[in-house]
Image: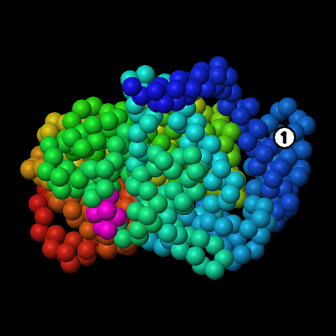
Amino acid sequence: MAVLGSLLKRGIGLTGTVIRRRRVNGSKSQRKAFIKLLNKARYTAFGEKYYFEDILSSALFRKDNQFYEQYRQHVPIHDYNKMYEEWWHRTKEGEKNVSWPGRVKFFALSSGTSEAASKYIPVTKDMVKAMQRTSIRQIIALSEFKDLSNELFEKGYLMLGGSTDLKFSGRYFEGDLSGINASQIPFWFERFYKPGKEIARIRDWEQKLDEITKQAKDWDIGYVVGVPAWIQLLLERIIKHYKLKHIHEIWPNLEVFGWGGVSFEPYRVGFEKLLGKPITYIETYLASEGFMAYQSRPNAKGMQLALNQGIFFEFIPFTDENFNGEGEVKPNAKTLMIDDVEEGVEYALLISTCSGAWRYLIGDTVRFTDKKRYEITITGRTKHYLSLCGEHLSVDNMNRALELACQELRISVPEFTVAGVPHDSLFAHHWYVGTDDPVEAQQLRNLIDQKLKDLNDDYAVERTHALKDVMVTVLPVQAFYDWMASKGKMGGQHKFPRVLRKMMIQEWEEFLVKRGYDAPVEANK
């Protein structure tokens, strides 16, 4: 009998009940978060330049939203390049009190999925603590998932992320955020944490997977967390190594998979083939810039924003009035606070954080699925959508169309990407679809095209005008993983871009030729 697990679950449940009884007030929570941020950063170089002292006074002593009007007026919107070139490069060079008090010890390396060069995202002590607090909130939320057993709370917690052997520059440590977080785990969690410190330090991705596979038989795993593509690869490797029918033959108590960063639907069919019984899926929104949101209840359509954990959120309606065709925000873009959003509208996310990001365009787009519970779903990236001629095709549309097509064809497509290309004097979309299941490319192409017409009215209109063709190239899934390996982006939080732009299209096509993937099945017309 899982006595400890029963006690832990009961304790978590009682804590969760107390938290639930405190009704979340988004406006109040965000105002508190805002005050804490400005109070701490007002004497930094950034805070002094942008009048944080005056804005803070309005937030403290006025009951209206004048503080936000001042904040919008004084502080410009920053993307990564603007934030780094004007402020963070000074932080990286060792200067203290630049955009957050003190010196920064950690930098998360992140290229997102649209940039080639690495981005250096500061991760302060305050941010590490904020992410740990949000993680605890997520654990407490497990009490809402009534089907989870008492035993789960005594089992191993496998986190598949980047290396904890961070590179030291002489002034700071740099690495994948998952590696930074794993290197800072609380002492009380170490007994549950897998793969353990030694394996977590390994930088070589293949070696790390091999070591985890060798140790897998000795672990009793209840919870797995990571990017779906890399978790699926690991489970496949373990099953093959031990000649298993499914992963539950070696980990019978596996009950939960925590994931984030991408839509899970393209992976679901292939992933569930690796299981011996159903498990619980819990979505999280953890980026290099902070822990934004997590699924707090079963069957929720979205994730609950972490409203008072070191992040102040703003929302920009993702429209032509606010963004240009390249997904870049316009100077006078309209921004909203949490109380002014609407369900079903797509917003680009702005964040101000305890890592010294201010009115920072993180690059993600979200939609509120439940405004009362402050629950969102990620719909894509500001630069990962296609609108060559007004079709306004989002990654959310792409994921859903492909999911519906796969259901009809009974195939699994864990990876895909789409490029907008010239077609005579007009335009076309070129889909590169990764699947190891047999499929007729022409049939897949027709299904994707029709599903997109059903989902997106603008797309349907443009398919009769400027968007003259859709092409589908079917590739083995390994082609996508080989591309990631060639870029040094295997494992961790790395993901394949769902939309290719500019030079990336040429690089991808040249890669396919070089690696012998240049004669795939292609469909158009």
Looking at numbered disc 1 in the image, what kind of residue is underneath it? Ala
Q: Residue 207: within the magenta?
A: yes
Residue 305 visible to the viewer: no
For the N terminus, the image quarter is top left
Kindly identify the residue that appears in the image at 90 percent across and 44 percent down. Answer: 57
Closest to the observer: 291 or 441?
A: 291
Kindly identify the residue that appears in the image at 44 percent across and 36 percent down. Answer: 154
Residue at the extreme bottom: 170
Closest to the observer: 519 or 332?
A: 519
Please say if 208 is above or below 466.
Answer: below
From the image, tell me which residue sits under label 1.
59
Please say if 504 is above or below 228.
Answer: below
Closest to the observer: 290 or 50?
A: 290
Q: Residue 278: within the magenta?
A: no
Q: What's the colour scheme? A: rainbow
- Please provide percent x and percent y for residue 239: 19, 50
Q: Residues within 10 Å of mark 1 (few under 14, many from 20)?
A: many
Kindly identify the residue that appears in the image at 74 percent across and 31 percent down. Answer: 28
- Please provide percent x and percent y for residue 385: 41, 53
Q: Quadrant of residue 521?
A: bottom left
- Please provide percent x and percent y for residue 103: 73, 68
Magenta: main secondary structure equals: helix
Residue 22 visible to the viewer: yes
Give the extent of the magenta segment. 206-212
Q: Is residue 304 left or right of residue 312?
A: left
* Element at label 1: helix
- Please provide percent x and percent y for residue 146: 43, 22
Kindly identify the residue that appears in the image at 91 percent across and 37 percent down. Answer: 61
Q: Quadrant of residue 430?
A: bottom left
